[in-house]
Image (cartoon, grey):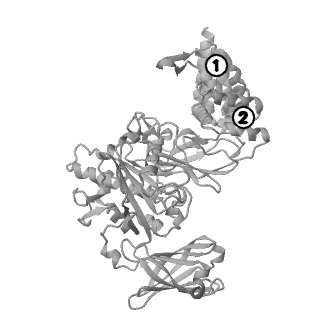
Amino acid sequence: MNQHNSERDATINNSISGLWTLESSTEHFGKDYNSSASSLQIKEELRLDIDGNYPQKAASGTWRLNNFYVHWVAKLQEVESNSWTGHIWYKDGDISQFPYTSITIKLEGITQQTAKLMFTSGDSFTHTSYYKRQSPYFHPVEFEYDSEDGVMAVTSIQTHAHPNHPHSLPNETLSIETVYRRAGFDVGLSSGASTIPISEAGLDIRWSDAEMHDAMQQHWSEYSESARWALWVFFASLHEDGPSLGGIMFDSIGSQHRQGTAIFNRSFITKAPERETHPEAWVQRMKFWTACHEIGHGFNLAHSWQKAMGTPWMPLENEPEARSFMNYPYSVQGGEKTFFENFEYRFSNDELLFLRHAPERFVKMGDAEWFDHHGFEQHNVLQNSSFKLDIRVNRETTRYEFLEPVVIELKMTNNTTEPHIINKNLLSDFTNMTVIVKKHGKVAKQILPYVRYIQQPENIVIPSGQSIYQSLFVSVGKEGWIIAEPGDYLIQVALHLKNEDIVSKELRIRVEPPMDRVEDFLAQDLFSDEIGRILYFDGSQYFKKGNDVLRTITEQIPHRKVSIHAQVALSLPMTKYYKKLGARKTIQISPPKLEEAKQILFPSLVEQSYVAANTLGHIDYKYYMEQFSNAIAFQYGQPTEAAVIQKKLYQTLTDRNVKADVLQEIKEKEEKYASMANRH
């Protein structure tokens, strides 16, 4: 089942770092470990990390006794030859039964294959364990490399094949297995590697996540529904997202995540720059880097600039300039050339600390979900950042009614004394934006939009101290409803720019419980993919069942804020000519139904203006009111009514202290409609 490559590093074989297991112990649980280990099902492990490849000068351990579990981590300082002390700064599990705060480790015997570890606390509690060295590695792991028929898997490279490399980089044939052995894993290769026909990618011959998941279940010889130290690596031609996607950790289907990853050989990673002098070596290097990068995600490593997201376990910071497999070569200052000039084909120290010493369930494939407990804690925005990113809601409280969709506002401010040029659509482009929502007690979720836009960049200048704004609908995405159940949620956004990364502070919101059984019943129909798409796209004339649900909501709970969102989605498509694909692929055009739309929008947006602005947010409320007034003026031919709508918009946002330049823009449109009315 498990074929080991004979390649091993002398630095690993000759080191004392790695996995040590319990030989004997003093009394701790009321019985002597040495005499009662079998009956008590005791298991103690020590992971010593003081020499070998990239030593982190750390130790970690796990205690298991029947249902008792504790995991601890300590940083070490050498006090004399083969002796170290350290403070236990991280604990996980039943920590109330683990009072120890510091450790002392001493190697004993001629061969130094026994480690004496004494645990102590400030209250003089002591406990001593003796361990035998079992392996120079911290965990075992098995990879299986499967390939699409006709696709060549790149699992090793010659490190000096491309002349752009560090002077100190050894000239060697480096394999994926060696990369992860040097990270601390006893890597074996499955004997079941196979070739997969392109027909399994469907008629478009591009792989979707679901198609790859099906292929993994069918072809991975070691596939399991349980968490295991094993990963499936698939070398394919092209993902359905196109050539812009070089690799992906696709496996987020079902309860077991992070078991499958794919690399795409017809993507941008196979297109060397025009003036590249060694294009073949460049392509091989990018394929190899992509494979190691995506496998790193399987171990639950985040991107170097995204470590502030998700659930914390250790106080580590983002590393936007790290020369790590988890960073993008083209995103560091100086770009891809500068990255590889200093890249030693390794992970950063913080990443190694996580891989070797985090609790096993955080790292092991199929255990903790992706982006939950990935090992990196919230930190402040980068020092001397050019921009500041804020997320907020324009309302008196961050408490939301049950069923009420959540709309937040992004504000990015030029933090410098100089003007800056940026893409006008930066805050609406999910290509360089990560949005994370975490419900209290649940795993963190990343919002994936229903659609991504390919837009020609339109640059604008932001003067010093000035800001740009954008609204963001965060309740739902293509993975389903993320904010639905009552409870507390954290929302955080990260922008990845060319030369720096901007991370917002967390926004905390609370969703109230349902008011009555009616709301509880309506929730069963509201929290569906169909309704999510209708609300996300501001309406649809295609989803008839979903529109019926929204009408029911406006009839049964008209006093609740979700009704305003429902009314907007139901009426906005009526304000314009609406195109649908009909039979025989003909385009059917429905004319506006302005009178019907007016009967819905006027009460919800104009008569309840304050409540509407509160739940929709200032940006979206302004947008909907302007769409409404524009339709009334030009398609309904009533500029006087359009002026009334604009006047109400102006009054509402004035009362809510909106910026003067926004109010001036609204005022000018009101005057424009009034002038049109006078001419008529």
Residue 499: give x, y in percent of width and height.
40, 50
Residue 223: give x, y in percent of width and height.
46, 56
Q: Which mark is residue 642?
A: 1
| Residue 85 shows in the view | yes
The number of callouts visible is: 2
Residue 549: give x, y in percent of width and height.
68, 31
Figure quadrant of residue 25: bottom right
Q: Which one is earlier in the sequence, the residue at label 2 or at label 1?
A: 2
Residue 88: give x, y in percent of width and height.
55, 76
- Looking at the figure, which quarter contains the C terminus? top right
Q: CA distance from mark 2 to mark 1?
A: 20 Å
| Residue 651 shows in the view | no
**Residue occupying the far bottom of the picture:** 110
Q: Is residue 509 left or right of residue 156?
A: right
Figure quadrant of residue 68: bottom right
Q: Residue at x 50, y 38 (%)?
A: 428
Amino acid type indicated by mark 2: Val
Above or below: residue 214 compared with residue 655: below
Q: Nearer the viewer, residue 675 or 596?
A: 596
Q: Nearer the viewer, residue 417 or 475?
A: 475
Q: Residues within 10 Å of mark 1 (few under 14, many from 20)?
A: many
Q: Residue at x 30, y 57 (%)?
A: 340
Q: Which residue is mark 2?
A: 611
Q: Secondary structure at mark 2?
A: helix
Q: Nearer the viewer, residue 209 or 651?
A: 209
**Residue occupying the far left of the picture:** 277
Q: Secondary structure at mark 1?
A: helix
Above or below: residue 209 compared with residue 89: above
- Looking at the figure, which quarter contains the N terminus? bottom left
**Residue occupying the far right of the picture:** 516
Amino acid type indicated by mark 1: Ala
Q: Which mark is residue 464?
A: none
